[in-house]
Image (spheres, grey):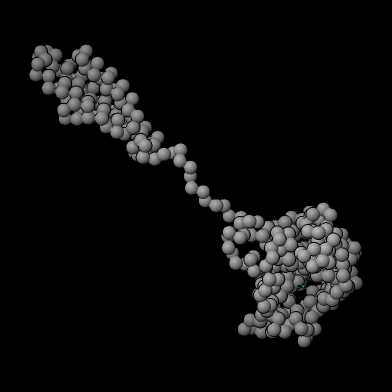
């Protein structure tokens, strides 16, 4: 009986010491396989005095049960720690495979940045569809019949002659004013379409950010102040802006807005074609006819509007020399930004 106790202690210690499935299997074979030490004990039963047979048999059975219980527990423990994988088959210290992270497209980065900057000035984001009505894209924006921008050479019309792919984000102004009373302060980033032949600076689709601020006494000075703020935040603290007189059907007066060249700071270089300035936006004071078209009283409110080309800003800021690089979706190129 002392021998049984000794085997029990030894067997249970061996189970605990088994460090993996292979070692544990060796312990099982040694103790309870058909020729193992524990079945072997039963073979001695015939040599045990009759009065002790019962107790002896009981003790061997207890040993068997204790062994099985400890064995099952250890097996479960090893499996949950490292699976049933034999040691050495999987080297956890090997470096993993690098999977490149995606990055935001330069157009998206700039759009996000513009939204951030204008939201500090109280602007919220408005949205409109790429497929627009001729009314929203042209009529309500004071384009007279026969205006050259309406020509099929410049604009993509759909089968329904009242529908087109918007040529600018300005129809969002119309949509927003038709559905909201003044005062309003919105920006509207989005995709636009024109029948341009693609080259280094033209693309048949491109992006703009529209801005519209309407209230009782909005002036051209507000426009200049807000765009100056945007220029400094987006392009650098010493960026200046200038207005040049221009014409748009839906603003009066109208201006083109230049930013001082962020590469040469106004001295003249290749990026700004030696002028020191880069054209970034069209803008102006909302024409009273537009207010009338959307049901606002031009005697009550004034407003400014602007439309900036996002690709232009991206190309200048990131030093992109060909607009087509922005649409080829070559991740090797885009992941630089
Ligand atoms: N929609 C004009 C364009 O695409 C830009 C613009 C917007 C001009 C708002 C004035 C006011 O060229």
> Is residue 320 something that shows in the picture?
yes
Seen in the picture, residue 267 relative to 139 is either above or below; the reply is above
Residue under the image location 30 percent in, 30 percent down: 23
Residue under the image location 77 percent in, 86 percent down: 146
Q: Nearer the viewer, residue 65 or 247?
A: 247
* In-image side of 104 versus 317 (left or right): left
- Quadrant hosting residue 222: bottom right
- Quadrant hosting residue 45: top left
* In-image side of 8 versus 198 (left or right): left
x and y, in percent, of residue 105 in the image = 64, 60
Q: Nearer the viewer, residue 206 or 293?
A: 206
x and y, in percent, of residue 62 in the image = 23, 22
x and y, in percent, of residue 210 in the image = 76, 67
Q: Quadrant of ligand 1?
A: bottom right
x and y, in percent, of residue 319 in the image = 71, 61
Residue under the image location 14 percent in, 14 percent down: 52
- Specify the quadrant that holds the C terminus: bottom right
Residue under the image location 68 percent in, 57 percent down: 109
> Is residue 181 something that shows in the picture?
no
- Specify the quadrant that holds the N terminus: top left
* In-image side of 82 versus 135 (left or right): left
Q: Give the farthest residue toward the bottom.
A: 146
- Quadrant hosting residue 186: bottom right
């Amino acid at each position: 009986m002392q021998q049984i106790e000794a085997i029990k202690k030894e067997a249970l210690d061996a189970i605990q010491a088994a460090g993996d499935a292979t070692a544990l299997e060796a312990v099982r074979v040694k103790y309870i396989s058909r020729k193992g030490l524990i079945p072997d004990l039963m073979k001695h039963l015939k040599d045990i005095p009759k009065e002790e047979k019962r107790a002896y048999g009981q003790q061997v059975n207890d040993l068997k049960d204790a062994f099985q219980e400890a064995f099952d527990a250890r097996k479960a423990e090893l499996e949950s720690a490292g699976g049933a994988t034999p040691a050495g088959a999987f080297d956890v210290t090997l470096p993993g495979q690098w999977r490149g992270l995606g990055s935001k497209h330069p157009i998206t980065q700039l759009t996000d940045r513009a939204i951030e900057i204008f939201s500090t000035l109280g602007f919220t984001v408005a949205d409109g569809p790429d497929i627009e009505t001729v009314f929203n894209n042209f009529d309500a924006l004071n384009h007279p019949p026969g205006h050259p921008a309406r020509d099929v050479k410049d604009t993509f019309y759909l089968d329904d002659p009242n529908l087109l792919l918007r040529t600018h984000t300005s129809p969002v102004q119309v949509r927003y004013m038709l559905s909201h009373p003044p005062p309003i302060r919105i920006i509207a980033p989005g995709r636009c379409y024109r029948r341009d032949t693609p080259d280094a600076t033209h693309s048949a689709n491109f992006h703009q950010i529209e801005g519209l601020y309407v209230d009782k006494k909005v002036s051209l000075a507000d426009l200049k102040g807000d765009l100056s703020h945007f220029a400094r935040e987006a392009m650098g603290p010493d960026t200046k802006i200038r207005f040049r007189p221009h014409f748009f059907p839906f603003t009066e007066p109208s201006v083109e807005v230049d930013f001082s060249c962020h590469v040469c700071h106004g001295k003249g270089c290749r990026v700004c074609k030696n002028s020191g300035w880069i054209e970034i936006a069209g803008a102006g004071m909302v024409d009273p006819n537009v207010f009338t078209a959307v049901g606002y009283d031009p005697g009550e409110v004034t407003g400014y509007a602007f439309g900036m080309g996002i690709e232009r800003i991206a190309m200048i800021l990131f030093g992109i020399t060909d607009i087509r690089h922005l649409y080829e979706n070559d991740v090797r190129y885009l992941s630089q930004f």
